[in-house]
Image (cartoon, rainbow, N blue to C red):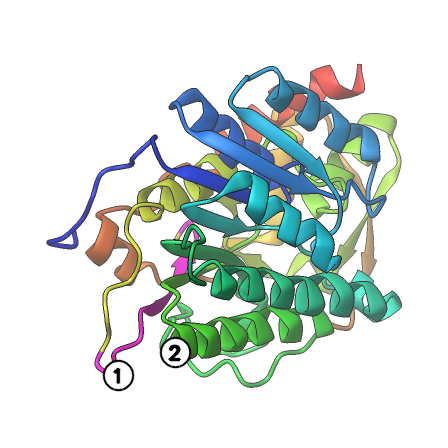
Amino acid sequence: MRPDYKEPNPTQRLLITGAAGFIGYHLSSRLLKEGYTVYGVDNLNDYYDVRLKECRLEQLKQNANFHFQYGSIADRKVVTEAFEKGCPDVVVNLAAQAGVRYSIENPDSYMESNVIGFYNILEACRHSYDKGRHPVAHLLFASSSSVYGDQKKTPFSVNDSVDRPVSLYAATKKSNELMAYAYSHLYGIPSTGVRFFTVYGPYGRPDMAYFGFSEKIRRGEPIKIFNNGDMYRDFTYVDDIVEGIARMLNNPPVSNETGDRYKIYNIGNNRSVRLMDFIETLEEALGKKAKKEYYPMQPGDVYQTYADVDDLMQDFDYRPLTDIKEGLRRFVDWFGGWVS
């Protein structure tokens, strides 16, 4: 644990972008229950079923401490208004165009949201330090395990080189890390990047494999399995992601050897599960076998992800603990109500 570690502080005002998204919803819900005031921003795009985003949003709106602004962070006016009205102490940027394979089909949306949008967030953080304004004490932003590319060394450490992304999505996430470092260095913005590893759980994203598999298995339709199921993922339950972020909120990076207040962390389950084993566990939770079709590896996919979380343990005395069997059981319990 960091010697200067500070417990969560619910008096802090939070701006969470992507608040109606998967992780954004779970993080907002957790923090609202703890007494935080959350100003959420989301454009509710139709990358996947908007009804799911609307369902998450309606639940958040039941808390009087939640304030919502509709709009895209790629729109400078939306971001400016959010900072002016929210006056955030901490900004958590989770808004992004997600998905590795979709980045091959529709690269424009990744440049708009992940690059231009994040630039607007950084500029707003920078100008929060202008005279008479409310300075942002900590910027946290979502990165991804995709930045590691198809490297063979495991587990993936934040000290590894990540200069060879194999998808545009990964390249935009790496660019976020570089942009945040530059702004932290130039303008003194305390910034933390978090590399998420294959997040799953209730209210999850329908474009993720486990969600799509569940829908097809329920309907008796075949599921597509790439590389004969010989791929490994560090599946991380969403509550474990939220716990990690919650511990970071009130603990911006201290100055490093160059004087910069900037750091990157992995949040992953610290174990790699073979895809076929994952599917068998999902079948068990659903109580139904899948019809399987096998396909070669897809462009942009990587063979394995596996998180080294030593820094997370060292600074926050935390590592994700939810095993895949328990996590999928919780997802299936929710999924049954969603599709009924």
Q: Which of 176 and 72 is in front in this view?
A: 72
Comparing labels 1 and 2, the label whose residue is closer to the camera: 2
Give the image location of residue 12, x and y in percent. Answer: 37, 37
Is 291 displayed left or right of 151 in the figure?
right
Circle 1 packing at 10 Å, graded few (<14), some (14-19), many (20+), is: few
Give the residues in magenta: 257-269
- The x, y position of residue 317, in whole percent, is 21, 47
Residue picked out by circle 2: 185
Q: Position of residue 258 (x, y in %)?
A: 26, 83
Q: Name the residue under label 1.
A: 258
- What is the crowding at mark 2: few (fewer than 14 residues within 10 Å), some, or many (at least 20)? some
Residue located at (59% from left, 33% from top): 25
Label 1 secondary element: loop
Does 266 lie within the magenta span?
yes
* Residue type at tag 2: His
Between the C-alphas of marks 1 and 2, the distance is 9 Å
Residue 336: image tag? none
Give above or below for 40 relative to 295: above
Disc 1 and disc 2 in contact, CB within 8 angstroms: yes
Residue beneath the point at 44% across and 57% down: 139
- Relative placement, left or right, of 94 versus 108 is left
Q: Is residue 97 visible?
A: no
Choose top left, top right, bottom left or bottom right for residue 233. Answer: bottom right
Judge whether residue 188 can be spotted in this image.
yes
- Does the magenta run of residues contain 79? no
- Secondary structure of the residue carrying tag 2 is helix
The three-letter amino acid code for the residue at tag 1 is Thr
- First of labels 1, 2 by sequence position: 2
Nearest the camera: 20 or 145? 20
The residue depicted at 67 percent of the width and 78 percent of the height is 166
Point out residue 176 in the picture as x, y percentages from the top left corner: 56, 70
For residue 57, which quarter of the picture? top right
